[in-house]
Amino acid sequence: MSSTTPTPPDELAPALAHEEATDPFTIAGQTFTSRLVLGTGGLPSLEVLERVVRASGTQLVTVALRRVEAVPGGSMLEVLERCGVRLLPNTAGCMTAREAVLAARLGREAFGTDWVKLEVIGDEVTLLPDAVELVDAAEQLVAEGFTVLPYTTDDPVLGRRLADVGCAAIMPLGSPIGSGLGIRNPHSIALLREAVDVPVVLDAGIGTASDAALAMELGCDAVLLASAVTRARDPERMALAMRQAVEGGRLAHGAGRIPRRWHAQASTAMQGRPELG
Amino acid sequence: MTVPITVNGAPAELPAGATVAVLVAERSGGHDRVAVARNGDVVPRSSWATTELSPGDRLEVLAPTAGG
């Protein structure tokens, strides 16, 4: 028996995991240690919102503006301020560049931030982005000093055009908003990641934790999701699952996965195999 | 004398000379951090008290809410 006291794995691994999984990333000079961006829509109460935000570990959450009579009472902003998260106003529901630019300006007025999640929707059935209006709006908002994070398709060429007009990050969809279909074209997401120098945030389509992990394994810098958590049977538990999936995917991306092989490759050496037959 | 306007898509009337500040006080429903658009442009909070409503103005009075 060796007299060396073994180091319990629990003391080593989490330290490494924590350091590696929380390696920071930066959008427009703002550094985040959480790579999970959370949408807030669809939760039953502010109490659940607070539990979900805390479980997710997020540092950036999306918010919206709606007509006063349609907005429930209670101060969502107080909850979010208490959680210490940064706000990312969206332009959800806008269908033209003109509408989206005005929505962004109103968001800046209400929330006191020049960050904007730019959504310009071209179709109410699929909620897919309108590429032409999106680039137009992005260009105008960048010129007005906004930090623009556009929700876009997984087209690497469009992603590059958005980066070229000065967007601070590119946010491609994995599949349509709220569909939970996951990442339908992983290859395209990986190509988009290669095509731009700004952060890529996988936005929309995430259904469950493995989808979020895949996004990170493909090289995305962060994941933005809402429905997958807010419409889960247990939103708080799913928020924690997403946090760990994003961290796991990030770790796996950094660790370097093995190449895929057509046939098996034994991990136990054949050399020295005993004759047991 | 009243000023006929449209607020959040519905017809409304306010006393002549009413400002955006008057409208917000009437409509904000306890929400803070309200934002106002008038005829497609933002009315900054600093201008609410000095921006008089004109007949036919289209106003949007908006409040922060959850969203994805």
Image (cartoon, coloured by chain):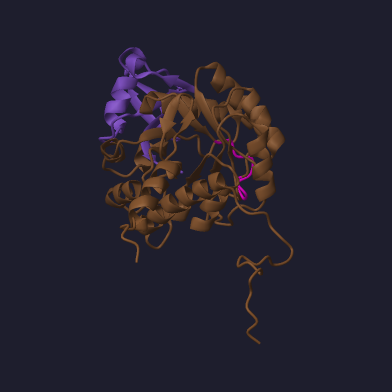
The percent position of residue A24, horizontal first and vertical second, equals 44, 35
The percent position of residue A51, horizontal first and vertical second, equals 30, 51
Work out whether residue A26 or residue A67 is closer to the camera in this orientation and state it. Answer: A26
Residue A82 part of the magenta segment: no
The percent position of residue B68, horizontal first and vertical second, equals 46, 44
A101 left or right, relative to A68: right
The percent position of residue A144, horizontal first and vertical second, equals 52, 17
A72 left or right, relative to A255: left
Q: Which chain comes out brown in the rendered image?
A: A
Q: Is residue A210 visible?
A: yes
| The N terminus of chain A - image quarter | bottom left
Instruction: Name the outermost residue toward the right.
Output: A262
Residue A257 drawn above or below residue A24:
below
Q: Look at 42% across and 30% down and name the residue there.
A: A31
Residue A126 part of the magenta segment: yes
Tell me which segment is drawn in magenta: A119-127
Q: Which chain comes out purple in the rendered image?
A: B
Q: Look at 71% across and 60% down and name the residue there.
A: A261
The chief SS type of the magenta part is loop
